[in-house]
Amino acid sequence: MIIGVPKEIKNNENRVGVTPAGVTELVRNGHTVYVQATAGEGSGFVDAEYEAAGATILPSIEEVYGIADMIVKVKEPIESEYNLVKDNQLLFTYFHFASHEPLTTAMIERNAVCLAYETVERADRSLPLLVPMSEVAGRMAVQQGAKYLEKPLKGRGILLGGVPGVRPAKVLILGGGVVGTNAAKIAAGMGADVTIMDTNLARLRYLDDIMPANVNTLMSNEYNVRQLLPTHDLIIGAVLIPGAKAPRLITRDMLKDMRPGTVLVDVAVDQGGCIETCKPTTHENPTFIIDDVVHYCVANMPGAVPYTSTQALTNATMPYVLMVANKGWKQACADNAELKKGLNVVNGKVVYAGVAEAFNLPYTPVEEVL
């Protein structure tokens, strides 16, 4: 198979879809890899490393899309890439279709085969290709939240961990999954007073067992959320429904209950956000203020730490990329139930129920396209 690795062109996205180590594995399995010039530089990988691993360097993104059977990326194609997608071309990347109708429409019109990292799902409901970036995003959410609590950045002017004789900041985490757990670990390690909320009582029991004493668990419901908002300094939205829009847990009217300088970090913003007032921002302009509340809503948070993120991501994706390259997408998805759940759009048909429901589109069972 011919695999293309374009350079990411989303604002301040420095990750790359395949590392030189990944190229080595693909070439060793008999595949041809084309990498766009400088695609890996943001993550610390220069063109010479890709060439040494067996890749061919192409100067432009148009050439990469033009020659490849499968495109391996990190983030969804942006508008300038839509027309580069060929008929029946396979794209393997993060899509988050349910939060972006123009992207969904474009991929349907381009007759593409869209395999989404975020919906590849194991039998235990875990999401192996989302986990590594969720781990990074959860940890970064606290780093960024701590920074934006500083007064020069319009925050409350509070040190997350406090100091002897001064109480630490209060951190509220909505969601006890991978993002929430990693956020709680970092916030607790920095000395904050942490509360993590979830609707799953079994998950709360587990978190209560493994977390340090400065992390409290609480059942998530609107009443409890409203009770805590006036007293918490940093609020992290970490809710995910695979392949569907995130539920709105904080509404516009709740902002009035928060103190000026409170910081909101919505990690779920690339799935539509769990905070009503959040809209996607970039690393270039990461925050905005509504009702004196600081909103940090960068949709590709791990892109700020690409050296770590790229390696963490490709550690998880490469076995699946190899599977698809070796067998072709149809056979690979027919043989592997995890990969099959990654199919979202196939040759003009929406084959993932959450995406069809989000935009009231016709739904085709995935078995009909295999």
Image: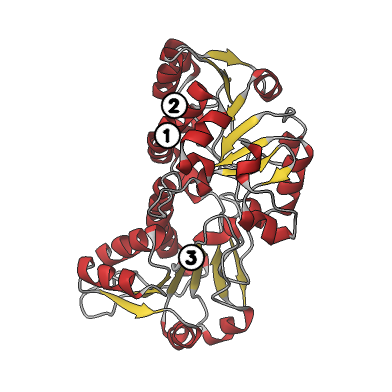
The colour scheme is secondary structure
Q: Is residue 49 left or right of residue 33?
A: left
Q: Amino acid at mark 3?
A: Val
Three-letter amino acid code at disc 1?
A: Thr
Point 41% across, 13% down: residue: 28
Do residues under tags 1 and 2 come within 8 Å of each other at their CB atoms? yes
Q: Position of residue 98 (x, y in %)?
A: 64, 56
Alpha-carbon distance for marks 1 and 2? Answer: 7 Å
Which of the 4 image quadrants contains residue 329? top right
Q: Residues within 10 Å of mark 3 (few under 14, many from 20)?
A: many
Q: Which residue is mark 2?
A: 19
Name the residue beneath numbered marker 1. 314
Residue 230: x %, y % from top left: 46, 86
Between 312 and 148, the one nearer to me in the picture: 312
First-in-chain label (1 vs 3): 3
Q: Along the polypeptide, which appears first: circle 1 or circle 2?
A: 2
Q: Earlier in the sequence, mark 3 or mark 2?
A: 2
Residue bearing the label numbered 3: 239
- What is the secondary structure assignment of the residue under circle 3? loop
Answer few, some or many: residues within 10 Å of disc 1's Cα (few below 14, many 20 plus, some between 14 and 19).
Answer: many
- Looking at the rendered structure, the secondary structure element under dot 2 is loop
Mark nearest the camera among 3 and 2 is 3
Look at 50% across and 61% down and name the residue there: 240
Q: Residue at x 26, y 68 (%)?
A: 206
Task: Tell me the element at label 1.
Answer: helix
Q: Nearer the viewer, residue 49 or 117?
A: 117
Query: Residue at position x 71%, y 48% from top?
Result: 104
The amino acid pointed to by label 2 is Thr
Task: Determine crowd level at label 2: few under 14, some 14-19, many 20+ residues with C-alpha closer than 10 A.
Answer: many
Image position, residue 166 (x, y; %): 27, 79
